[in-house]
Structure formats: structure tokens, C-alpha cells
Image (cartoon, rainbow, N blue to C red):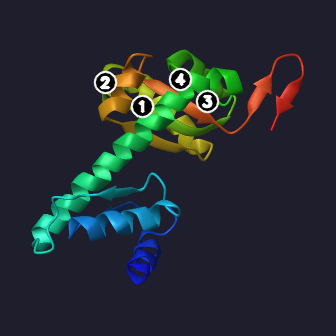
């Protein structure tokens, strides 16, 4: 298990997803061993048998990565919605997000498919602005998209906050 964990960490790197499977007890143990080093990037697929074909492995990896990505996106959007205003490091909704894009404070821009379809020109401007300032741009789906659509379909994580009457705070 120690060798498998080291190999998985090497292959996944600092940000890659890790999907485990095989003998259920062993898969769980491997996932537990990895969890301290790759929290929120591991999914154990108990239905993935040790005799799985390459096609089964590829499908498990695709579904696992999608599941992990959706969970991470939902957590990011929830963080922006719950505490973005309190910490000043999040912008929720198109108006607030456009304002922070204009101020060049955006680290990550999140959009939903619905926003892209219904506001194509505004979305294109937002994406161009985000890329111009070196921000990551991501179209969210699943639960994250549902959360974000409830707030207009656009949000951002910010590089720094601006405190009223006291200037910029890093």
C-alpha cells in the first residue's frame, strides 16, 4: 500500500484526481492512506473490480474525476456564497463579479452553462477580462451550477479584498 500510495501521488501530482478500487478493503485502505496528502482529491470506487477491463478502468476514472470536480466546484461556490462577502474574497452574481473584473482582482471566474447561453456577449467580455488578468476560468456543472444559477450564474474568487475607507488589503 505504501508503494501504491507513493506511485499514485507521483502520477497525480499536486492537483490530480485519484480514483482507487479493486479489493474493497484494500481500496478503502489505500484511499485512507492517501487522504492526508490529497484530501478532497480521492474517490474509492468499490464497484471497480480487480478484474476490470481497461475500458472499465477508463470509465471509472472519467466518472470519478467528474464526481470529484463537481464536489470541488460545489464547495468553491458554497464558500463564495457563504463567506465571500464576510471575508471580502468573493464576488457573487454578475454585477459584483463584473465590478471585481473591472478592478482586476479576480483569481478564479466561475460561470454556468445557462449564463453562457443567455448572456453570451457579457460572458465573452467577462472571460476575456479574466484571462487578461491571469485568472482561471471555469464553467461549473451539477450542484455547483445549480447554486450559482440561483445567484445569476457568475461568481469569482478574488486575489485581494478592498476595505472601505482604508484602501486595499492584501
* Residue sitting nearer the eye, 141 or 167: 141
Query: Which is more N-terminal, label 4 or label 1?
Result: 4
Task: Tell us which disc is closer to us: 2 or 3.
Answer: 2
Q: Identify the image quadrant of residue 46.
A: bottom left
User: How far is disc 2 from disc 3 in space, using C-alphas?
Assistant: 20 Å
User: How far is disc 4 from disc 3 in space, using C-alphas?
Assistant: 18 Å
What residue is drawn where x is 56% and y is 23%?
82
| Quarter placement of the N terminus | bottom left
Q: Secondary structure at mark 4?
A: helix
Query: Which is more N-terminal, label 3 or label 4?
Result: 4
Residue where numbered disc 3 is placed:
101
Q: Identify the image quadrant of residue 97.
A: top right
User: What numbered label is drawn on residue 111?
Assistant: 1
Circle 1/circle 4 CB separation < 8 Å? no
Residue where numbered disc 4 is placed:
81
Above or below, comparing residue 42 to residue 11 in the picture = above
Above or below, comparing residue 99 to residue 104 in the picture = above
User: How far is disc 1 from disc 2 in space, using C-alphas?
Assistant: 8 Å
Task: Tell us which disc is closer to us: 4 or 2.
Answer: 4
Task: Tell us which disc is closer to us: 3 or 1.
Answer: 1
Residue where numbered disc 2 is placed:
114
Question: Seen from this angle, which residue lies furthest right?
Answer: 166
User: How far is disc 4 from disc 2 in space, using C-alphas?
Assistant: 18 Å
Residue 152 vs residue 157: left or right? left
What residue is drawn where x is 13% and y is 73%?
54
Percent coordinates x, y for residue 51 in the rendering: 10, 75
User: What numbered label is drawn on residue 170?
Assistant: none
Q: Secondary structure at mark 1?
A: strand
Circle 4/circle 2 CB separation < 8 Å? no
Q: Identify the image quadrant of residue 139.
A: top left
- Give the class, few, some or many, for how many residues have Cα within 10 Å of label 2's Cα (few <14, many ≥20): some
Amino acid at each position: 500500500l505504501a508503494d501504491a500510495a507513493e506511485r499514485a501521488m507521483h502520477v497525480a501530482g499536486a492537483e490530480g484526481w485519484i480514483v482507487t478500487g479493486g479489493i474493497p478493503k484494500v481500496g478503502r485502505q489505500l484511499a485512507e492512506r492517501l487522504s492526508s496528502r490529497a484530501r478532497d482529491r480521492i474517490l474509492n470506487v468499490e464497484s471497480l473490480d480487480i478484474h476490470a477491463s481497461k475500458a472499465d478502468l477508463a470509465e471509472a476514472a472519467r466518472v470519478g474525476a467528474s464526481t470529484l470536480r463537481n464536489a470541488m466546484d460545489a464547495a468553491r461556490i458554497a464558500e463564495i456564497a457563504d463567506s465571500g462577502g464576510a471575508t471580502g474574497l468573493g464576488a457573487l452574481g454578475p454585477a459584483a463579479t463584473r465590478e471585481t473584473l473591472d478592478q482586476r482582482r479576480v483569481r478564479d471566474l466561475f460561470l454556468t452553462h445557462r449564463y453562457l447561453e443567455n448572456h453570451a456577449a457579457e460572458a465573452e467580455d467577462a472571460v476575456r477580462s479574466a484571462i487578461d488578468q491571469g485568472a482561471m476560468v471555469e464553467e461549473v456543472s451539477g450542484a455547483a451550477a445549480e447554486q450559482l444559477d440561483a445567484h445569476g450564474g457568475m461568481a469569482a474568487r478574488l486575489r485581494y479584498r478592498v476595505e472601505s475607507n482604508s484602501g486595499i488589503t492584501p
